[in-house]
Image (cartoon, rainbow, N blue to C red):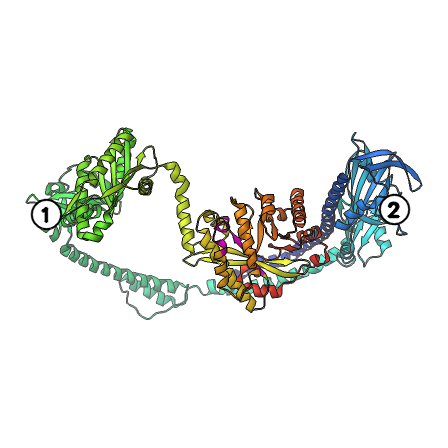
Amino acid sequence: MQKKISTIWRFLLPVLVLLAVAPFVLTGQQASQQLDNIHAGASEQAHTLVRLLDVTEELVSEQANSAMRLLKQRSQELGKVHIDGLVQFQAMTLPNLKMGETEVAGHFNLVDGVSDLFGGTATMFVRSGDGFVRIATNVKQDNGARAVGTVLNPKGKVIGALLAGKEYHGVVDILGQPYITRYDPVFDENGQVIGAYYIGYKVDIKILRDTVENMRQLTTGFAVILDETNNVRFLSSHVDHAKAEKLLKSRPGNWEFVTESVPSWGFKVVVAYPISEARAVSLANAWFVVFAGILLGTLLIFIILWQLRRLILNPIGGDPALAIDVVKRIAAGDLAQDGLNAKPDTLMASVLEMRQKLRESIDTLQLNAERMRLSASVFDHAHDGIFITDANANIVEVNYAFTQITGYSREEALGHVPQALGFVTYDDSLLDLLWLQAESNSEWRGETWNRRMNGDVYAAWLDIFCVRDEANHIKNFVGLFSDITQAKEQQQNLERMAYHDPLTQLPNRALLSDRLQQALARAERSGELLAVCCLDLDGFKPVNDTLGHEAGDYLLVQLAVRMSACLRDSDTVARLGGDEFAVLLCGLQSVDECTQTLERLLSVIKTPYSLGDKTVTVSSSIGYTIFPDDGCEPDTLLRHADHAMYQAKLNGGSRVQQFDSHHDRQFRGLRQDRERVEAALPNDEFRLHYQPKVDLRQGKVVGMEALIRWEHPELGLRGPITFLPIIEDTDFSIPLGEWVIREALGQIKIWQAAGLDFQVSVNIAARHIVQSNFTERLILLLAEFPEVEPRKLELEITETAAIEDVSGVANTINSCKQLGVSFALDDFGVGYSSLTYLRRLPVETIKIDQSFVRDMLQDVDDLAVVAGVISLSRDFKRKVVAEGVETSEQGVWLLRMGCSVVQGYGIARPMHADAVLNWVEAYQQDPSWTQGLV
């Protein structure tokens, strides 16, 4: 018992010492960390106030810059800035500052116009000596009068920058309040400073004041903002003003002061707190660590006691005598189960587990022996031949199938190497290489040709692998082989069928591809020309239709014989299918040689054919391309030859046509794309979406524009820019345009029934509008919907379209207008005949292109174009619609310029017809458009 107790204390003493010291160490660390956290919190509060001041200055400065640009722009519009003598102003004699012919003194429209748009205050100064006098301003004095005649603070930081000819940006104290300002010098033509521009904004500091007043660091700490003269601007509300000034002035050592500067304001942010209070808070928080340490130490003692009992006091886990008896029985080979159990992770449990694993190992050995007997049975009864050799490749065992395949008995085979028994009969050295490869890779497999004992040669699939001992040395080689002679014969027949046309016995497309690859390689090596040709028969279909398919097949067989006889052995004739053939002409020296050969072939094809008692004649269209002049891939060469053959047919057939690569690159993709777009109409893949047009003055929806979309089955919904340019100059634009009109009229009918009454605009292609029967076709379309009044349909003509017969289109428009249909000129300003179309086409509406509207507030040229188009519309007595309105500010500017009807993403994106009714009911106009303000 004494020994057990000493062991326990040997473990417990270090733990108790650690538990006594650890709480005090942790308390000190926690207190220090808490002080660091408090200081970091004070710094974060100071940084927050600095960021708030910087963000305020940055936002207002951007607006001041915009106002200054407008002030300078309008000054430049008045004329050149100069001094024209002296002028009496506000009982002072001042230099007469002029902009063009306009005296700036007392000219308030300039500064008021800028303030009306951007807010804030604006001023024009004139330089008088080394001072600057306000001569046009909307800065108000205490009595409400304009502060004209007052001078710029001569001791301020602004006047020095202006006298040096530099701009000034920053915060200036005006009437006891901070203003964010910008001063720019005004120069005469000699570069002398003669005045100054001023833009200023009084900063709304309520948010800043509230933030500072609500700040508190610990209980008695505070936050304060000092101006550039160290006067208190803002202070936490819980601190007395006099006390705060006293602390800031004396800076006692028992207080911590965190100070951050704000250069753009000239202010300083200070967060202060008493160090004694911070330490008290830190120690209070650290007591939790002490309590937790004591609790964990107590728990640790209980855990140690429990582990000592489990690992030291009870190590065996059972009766020692019983454990010794079990070990003896295992040593004697008695592994029988006797029902003994032991606690896990004890010595007794390990002994019982060892006995179980020994019993499982013996069972595994017995199972392996059974498998060996099974493997021997498989070896004897396998249908594949098997031989086993020693490390020197001498056969030591064969199975029954070996004797049946090779003809050698087991006794005749033993002791010989496989080469002596006819293996790999055509290359005696190959089998030696196979042994080496099997030795290095542990396996080899492949086809070999062997010879039986009676001399017959047979094909075999042979696998050879090696067996290694524990030292990784090769002990045996094992070979498995099967007779595949019959399979090889079948393979050859299948290859013949796979690579030749069953009717004509000519090479098919697969064999042609292989020969084309080989021919290209030869042509590259030799530098000779290779002609890749495609041909099909002209007039073959009537033979099939009148004489039957058997006669047509017989004609094709005769044709194959003729073409093969006409060409050289080095050339290839292949049947691609039906009456389509391909020809490879190899080893050509010139293009003329190719042409002569194809002309001769064409003459042979034209020779009459005898089909029973009938004689028929067919011809052929032949297209070809020359390699390496056409250096494309093999499949592309065939496609080029096919294109040339197609062109030969278009040129009348019965001729030879060479591939034109330039023409193909230009029109190859266009034809495929055009065919796919044209197929979308009968496949019902087109959809109409509608974009609203609203009147900003009335605040209501006045129309919709129908915009086509293509619901591609693979690519999804596609916009018109992806497919309309492909077909706009084709006849397909006519049925597509009629489909759009019919769909729009049908939708108007549906909306009428739902109580919606507005006009729908439809875009018309130039190729469609120039049709002589356009009016008659439109009458038929309108007749399909008698419930729809023609005035509800508006047709838009794109201004970028090239219309050759302008007078004819004008007559068409007039005849359609008699029906009640109206017209608009779309995308006005981006084409090449804007004024011509506007003057000669009797349209009611002009639509300003979105490219001008979108950037008009950033680009003065675009703004001028928009204003000019609106002015033209008034002069020509046309309505005007602005496209591409995306912001409320654009709408306000358009209203001011006289355009009230607009459309664009700022109103709504194009939407499905089913969504229009709900959108119209929920539409609410932007308030700034009603007020006319941004």
Instruction: State which region is magenta.
Output: 759-775
Q: In front: 153, or 104? A: 104
Amino acid beneath label 2: Ala
Quick check: is 393 in the magenta stretch? no
Q: Which residue is mark 2?
A: 147
For the residues marked 2 and 1, what is the alpha-carbon distance in whole angstroms?
A: 123 Å
Position of residue 748 relative to residue 832, above or below, is below
Dot 2 or dot 1: first in sequence order is: 2
Q: In front: 684, or 403? A: 684
Q: Residue at x 41, y 40 (%)?
A: 666
Judge left or right: residue 205 versus residue 566.
right
Q: Secondary structure at mark 1?
A: helix
Quadrant into which the C terminus falls: bottom right
Q: Which residue is mark 1?
A: 406
Expressed as whole percent of the image width and height from the top left, the position of residue 172 reads 81, 45
Q: Secondary structure at mark 2?
A: loop
Mark 1, other Cα within 10 Å: few <14 / some 14–19 / many ≥20: many
The tally of labels here is 2
Expressed as whole percent of the image width and height from the top left, the position of residue 231 reads 84, 48
| Residue 481 seen in the current view | no
Give the farthest residue toward the bottom: 339
The quarter of the picture where residue 650 lies is top left
Amino acid beneath label 1: Thr
Expressed as whole percent of the image width and height from the top left, the position of residue 857 reads 67, 47
Q: In front: 747, or 385? A: 747
